[in-house]
Image (cartoon, grey):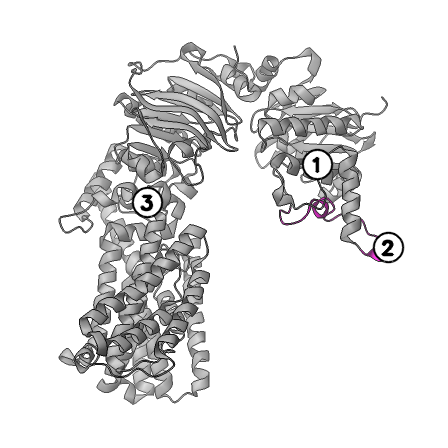
C-alpha cells in the first residue's frame, strides 16, 4: 500500500479562549474513505478547514501529505497541493450549463487561448462519461435535480485532479434515493484511488461507504475504528462520552396526557421536505420532535401552521376531528393553533415595535373600541398583563422589544401567542440562543401551559428540552418519522442513535 | 418598587422624546428655511405668496398621504401623477354631461382600479411595485391623452370650482382639504388595526404573515388607497385650475416621494410619521417657490431641488448610522 495519503498527528487549534481542537489525529490510506464524526462543536469543521488551508493549525506533531510535510498557507495553496474541498451547499451557478460550471475558474484553454463552447462541452462530457454520470454537459444546471447537481459539484472538484477530497456533509441536502446515487459515485472515486474525508452526521451513510471511522469529541480524537469491528451503538457512545450516558429517571409531570385528540396528522407529505408523517397530539400533552438539522423539523412546524410555501402534496391535518384544507396562518390562529418560530430575529420580533405592539399583532383586530379604532386601554392592559405574568424584565410594555435580552424577547413572543388563546401550541426551538436562567423559566412556562390543557409540540435539537419536558418524543430523519419514545425509553442515547442512523434504536 | 416605577416613567419620557425628535428637528429646519427666505426675498412672506404656495402644494400633499401609506407598507407607487391626470381628464370631459356628483363618484373609482390592478400584479406575481407602477403609469398617461385627444379640457362648471377656489378664513380650500386628507391618513395609520398591519408588513413581511396577517390583501388595499388619493388630488386640482391637460402633473411622483422621504419615511418601509411628511412636502414646495422668487434660471431649478433632496436623505442616513452605533 505504501505511503498513506494523509497523516494527522496531534493537531491543535484555539480561537481566543476556546480550544476548538485539543488533539486531533487520524490516518487516511490511498483509495480509502475515512468518516469524521462527532456532535456539533466537536471540531470536525475546524479540522477540515485546517486541511483546506482556511485556518492554520496552532501546532501539530505532524501533518504529512503523501509522506511530505503539509501546512498550507491558504486555500489556493491547499488546492495546488491536491486537497480539494466539496462544500455542504451546492455552490453552482444555476444559470450556466453543466460544462461551464465544471470548468469555472479552471478553464481548459484551446489553441491561442480561445475557448469554444463546443470543446468545453466535449471535455466536460468526457469527464462525466468517465465516471458514468448520465448528464448532458450542455444542459443548464438549474434544470437538474439535487443529486445530479451534487454530482456535478463533485466532478467539478475532480478537474483539480485531487489526491484528497474533503467532503463536508455531502448528502445533507438530498433525499433518501438521491443519497444512494451520490454515495455510489463516492465509492467509485475511492476505487479509482482518491482518498476521501467524509464528514457526516448520518452514521448509516458513514457505515455504508467508509473504511475507517474517526470520532471527535471536544476537539479530541476519541477513537480511530475499523468499520468492520464496530457498530453504530459503539460510535454513538464514543460521540457522547460516559458522562452523558447516565440519565436521571425523568420526573414525570403529574397528569398523564388525556385521550382527547386535538391534532391528528396523517401521511402528511410536502414534496422534498416531508414524507408520510402521521401522529396524534392530545390535550395537555407535550410532544417533542427532534432529529438532525435538516431532517424536516422546522418544515413540519411550518406545514402544520399553513405557512406559504409549505403546502402539503399529500395527507391530512385534522383539528379536533375536522380535516382542514386551504390552510394558512390566519385560519390556523382562528382554529387555536399557534407557532413560535425558530428564527426569532427574522421571523419573530419586529424590533422597533413596542412589547405591547409585538404581543398584539395576531389579535390586533380585537383590540378595538366602540368606534372601531384601536383601544389604548385594551392594548395597555394586555401589554402590562403579559409583562407581569411571564416575568419579562422591562421597564414597561411600551419600550421597543429590541431593548430586551434574547430570553425576555422570547418570553414576549410566547405571551404574544398565549394571547391568541391557543389549544395547540407549536414551539420551534424555544430555548435556542438564550441564557440559562431564561431557558428554565421558559421550560416552566411550557409545563404550565400544558397543565392547563393545551396540546404542546416542541421542536428542538437540544436534548435537554426533549428529555426534561416531553411526555413523548418523535425522531425524524430526512423528512420521515423513524422512531417514537415515551416514558423510560425517552433518553438521550436512544434518541441520538435513532437521529443519526435513521433506524429506531432498541 | 418605587425606584422601578420612577425608572419606568423616565424611560417612557425618553422614549417619547426620542420618537418625536425627528418631528421637532423637521419643524426647526422648516422655520430656519422660512426665516432665511423671508430675509432674502421680501415677497416671500407676503400673504398672496403664502396663499399661492398653499394652493399649489395641495395636490402634492393629498398624493403624499397615499404615498406615505404605500411606502410604510414597503412598496412604491410611481403611477400617481399619471392617475391624477387621467382622473382629471375624465372628470373634465364628463362633468358637463352627467353632473358634478355622478362625475365625482366615477372619478374616484379610477385610482383604486389602477391600484387594485397593480396590487394584484405585485402580490400574485411578485413583481416589484416600482416596475409594476411604471407600467400602469404609462398606461394611465396614455389613456389621459386618448381621453382629451391632446386638447385642453376647460368647460368645468362654476359650482364645482368652489372646491378649488374657496378661501374660508383666507386659507385656500385645497390646502384645507389636503390637511384633512393627511389627518385621515394619520388616524388610519396610527389608530386602526389596519394601520398597525401596514407598519408590521413594512417592517418584516414574514413576521406579519406568520402572525396571521393577510399580507397580499393589505398590500392591495394600500395601493388602492394611494390610487384614491391620486384621483382625489386630480379632482381638487381640476377645481382649482378649471382646466386640464393630459400631461398635467408629470414628475409629480418623484416630487412626492422626495417629500415623503424628507419627511422621514424609511425607503425600506416599516417606519415613518405621516405628520412629518407634511413638512417634507412643504420643504420641497418652499424651495421651488423660493427659486422662482429669486429668479433662478429655470433650467437650474431641478438641479437645486435634486441636490437638496440628496442632502436631506444623506443627513438622515448619517443620523441613523450615528444612532445605530450608540
Quadrant the N terminus of chain B occupies = top left
Which element carries disc 1, helix, strand or loop?
A: helix
Say if residue A74 shows up in the picture.
no
Which element carries disc 2, helix, strand or loop?
A: helix
Task: Pick whichever, A134 or A178, lies toward us.
Answer: A134
Disc on res. A154: 1
Q: Alpha-carbon distance for marks 1 and 3?
A: 44 Å
Q: Alpha-carbon distance for marks 2 and 3?
A: 61 Å
Disc on res. B213: 3
A314 to B310, vertically: above or below: above
Q: The residue marked by circle 3 belongs to what chain?
A: B
Q: Which residues are magenta?
A: A93-114
Q: The residue marked by circle 1 belongs to what chain?
A: A
Q: Alpha-carbon distance for marks 2 and 1?
A: 27 Å
User: What residue lies at 44% left-to-right and 15% top-to-bottom?
Assistant: A485
On the same chain: label 2 and label 3? Answer: no
Q: The residue marked by circle 2 belongs to what chain?
A: A
Disc on res. A111: 2
On the same chain: label 2 and label 1? Answer: yes
* Magenta highlight on residue A108: yes
Rendered image quadrant of residue B70: bottom left
As drawn, the residue found furthest toward the front would be B97
Q: Which secondary structure dominates the residues rendered in magenta?
A: loop
> Residue B309 appears at what percent x and percent y?
42, 71
Mark 3 closeness class: few <14, some 14–19, many ≥20 residues within 10 Å? many
Kindly indicate whether the residue at mark 3 contacts the one at mark 1 (C-beta within 8 angstroms).
no
On the same chain: label 1 and label 3? Answer: no
A482 to B103, vertically: above or below: above
Say if residue A335 shows up in the picture.
yes
Rendered image quadrant of residue A80: top right
Disc on res. A417: none
Amino acid at each position: 500500500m505504501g505511503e498513506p495519503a494523509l497523516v494527522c498527528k496531534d493537531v491543535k487549534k484555539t480561537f481566543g479562549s476556546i480550544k476548538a481542537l485539543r488533539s486531533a489525529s487520524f490516518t487516511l490510506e490511498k483509495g480509502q474513505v475515512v468518516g469524521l464524526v462527532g456532535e456539533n462543536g466537536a471540531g470536525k469543521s475546524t479540522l477540515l478547514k485546517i486541511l483546506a488551508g482556511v485556518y492554520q493549525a496552532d501546532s501539530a506533531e505532524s501533518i504529512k501529505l503523501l509522506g511530505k510535510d503539509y501546512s498550507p498557507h491558504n486555500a489556493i495553496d491547499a488546492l495546488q497541493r491536491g486537497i480539494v474541498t466539496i462544500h455542504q451547499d451546492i455552490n453552482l451557478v444555476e444559470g450556466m450549463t453543466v460544462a461551464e460550471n465544471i470548468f469555472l475558474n479552471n478553464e481548459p484553454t484551446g489553441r491561442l487561448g480561445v475557448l469554444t463552447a463546443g470543446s468545453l462541452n466535449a471535455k466536460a462530457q468526457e469527464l462525466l462519461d468517465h465516471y458514468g454520470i448520465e448528464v448532458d454537459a450542455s444542459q443548464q444546471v438549474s434544470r437538474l435535480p439535487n443529486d445530479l447537481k451534487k454530482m456535478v459539484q463533485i466532478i467539478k472538484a475532480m478537474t483539480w485532479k485531487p489526491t484528497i477530497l474533503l467532503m463536508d456533509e455531502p448528502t445533507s441536502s438530498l433525499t433518501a434515493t438521491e443519497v444512494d446515487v451520490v454515495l455510489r459515485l463516492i465509492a467509485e472515486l475511492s476505487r479509482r484511488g482518491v482518498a476521501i474525508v467524509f464528514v457526516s452526521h448520518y452514521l448509516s451513510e458513514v457505515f455504508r461507504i467508509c473504511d475507517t471511522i474517526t470520532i471527535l469529541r471536544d476537539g479530541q480524537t476519541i477513537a480511530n475504528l475499523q468499520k468492520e469491528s464496530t457498530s453504530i451503538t459503539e460510535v454513538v457512545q464514543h460521540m457522547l462520552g460516559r458522562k452523558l450516558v447516565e440519565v436521571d429517571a425523568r420526573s414525570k409531570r403529574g397528569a398523564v396526557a388525556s385521550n382527547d385528540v386535538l391534532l391528528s396528522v396523517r401521511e402528511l407529505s410536502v414534496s422534498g421536505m416531508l414524507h408520510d408523517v402521521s401522529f396524534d397530539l392530545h390535550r395537555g400533552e407535550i410532544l417533542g420532535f427532534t432529529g438532525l438539522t435538516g431532517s424536516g423539523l422546522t418544515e413540519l412546524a411550518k406545514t402544520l401552521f399553513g405557512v406559504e410555501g409549505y403546502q402539503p402534496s399529500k395527507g391530512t391535518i385534522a383539528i379536533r376531528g375536522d380535516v382542514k384544507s386551504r390552510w394558512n396562518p390566519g385560519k390556523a390562529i382562528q382554529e387555536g393553533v399557534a407557532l413560535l418560530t425558530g428564527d426569532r430575529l427574522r421571523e419573530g420580533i419586529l424590533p422597533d415595535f413596542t412589547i405591547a405592539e409585538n404581543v398584539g399583532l395576531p389579535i390586533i383586530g380585537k383590540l378595538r373600541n366602540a368606534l372601531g379604532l384601536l383601544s389604548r386601554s385594551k392594548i395597555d392592559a394586555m401589554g402590562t398583563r403579559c409583562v407581569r405574568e411571564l416575568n419579562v424584565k422591562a421597564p414597561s410594555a411600551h419600550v421597543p422589544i429590541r431593548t430586551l435580552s434574547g430570553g425576555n424577547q422570547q418570553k414576549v413572543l410566547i405571551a404574544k401567542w398565549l394571547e391568541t388563546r391557543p389549544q395547540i401550541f407549536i414551539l420551534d426551538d424555544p430555548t435556542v440562543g438564550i441564557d440559562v436562567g431564561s431557558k428554565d423559566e421558559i421550560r416552566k412556562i411550557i409545563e404550565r401551559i400544558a397543565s392547563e390543557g393545551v396540546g404542546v409540540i416542541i421542536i428542538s435539537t437540544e436534548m435537554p428540552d426533549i428529555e426534561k419536558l416531553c411526555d413523548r418524543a418523535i425522531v425524524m430523519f430526512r423528512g420521515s418519522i423513524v422512531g417514537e419514545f415515551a416514558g423510560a425509553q425517552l433518553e438521550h442515547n436512544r434518541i441520538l442513535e435513532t437521529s443519526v442512523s435513521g433506524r429506531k434504536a432498541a | 418598587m418605587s425606584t422601578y416605577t420612577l425608572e419606568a416613567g423616565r424611560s417612557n419620557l425618553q422614549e417619547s422624546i426620542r420618537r418625536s425628535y425627528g418631528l421637532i428637528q423637521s419643524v426647526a429646519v422648516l422655520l430656519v428655511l422660512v426665516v432665511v427666505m423671508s430675509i432674502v426675498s421680501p415677497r416671500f412672506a407676503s400673504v398672496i405668496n403664502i396663499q399661492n404656495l398653499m394652493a399649489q402644494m395641495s395636490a402634492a400633499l393629498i398624493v403624499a398621504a397615499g404615498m406615505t401609506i404605500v411606502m410604510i407598507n414597503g412598496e412604491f407607487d410611481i403611477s400617481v401623477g399619471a392617475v391624477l391626470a387621467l382622473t382629471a381628464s375624465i372628470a373634465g370631459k364628463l362633468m358637463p354631461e352627467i353632473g358634478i356628483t355622478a362625475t365625482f363618484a366615477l372619478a374616484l373609482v379610477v385610482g383604486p382600479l389602477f391600484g387594485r390592478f397593480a396590487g394584484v400584479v405585485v402580490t400574485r406575481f411578485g413583481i416589484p411595485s416600482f416596475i409594476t407602477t411604471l407600467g400602469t403609469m404609462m398606461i394611465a398617461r396614455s389613456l389621459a391623452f386618448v381621453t382629451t385627444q391632446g386638447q385642453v379640457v376647460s368647460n368645468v362648471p362654476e359650482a364645482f370650482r368652489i372646491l378649488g377656489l374657496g378661501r374660508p378664513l383666507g386659507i385656500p380650500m385645497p390646502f384645507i382639504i389636503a390637511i384633512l386628507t393627511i389627518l385621515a391618513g394619520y388616524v388610519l395609520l396610527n389608530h386602526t388595526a389596519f394601520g398597525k398591519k401596514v407598519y408590521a408588513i413594512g417592517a418584516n413581511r414574514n413576521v406579519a404573515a406568520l402572525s396571521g396577517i393577510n399580507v397580499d390583501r393589505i398590500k392591495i388595499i394600500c395601493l388602492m388607497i394611494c390610487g384614491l388619493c391620486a384621483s382625489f388630488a386630480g379632482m381638487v386640482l381640476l377645481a382649482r385650475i378649471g382646466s386640464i391637460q393630459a400631461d398635467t402633473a408629470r414628475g409629480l411622483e418623484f416630487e412626492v416621494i422626495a417629500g415623503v422621504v424628507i419627511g422621514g419615511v424609511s425607503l425600506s418601509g416599516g417606519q415613518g410619521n405621516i405628520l412629518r411628511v407634511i413638512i417634507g412636502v412643504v420643504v420641497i414646495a418652499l424651495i421651488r417657490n423660493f427659486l422662482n422668487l429669486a429668479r433662478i434660471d429655470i433650467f437650474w431649478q431641478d438641479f437645486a431641488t435634486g441636490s437638496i433632496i440628496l442632502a436631506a436623505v444623506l443627513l438622515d442616513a448619517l443620523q441613523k448610522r450615528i444612532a445605530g452605533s450608540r
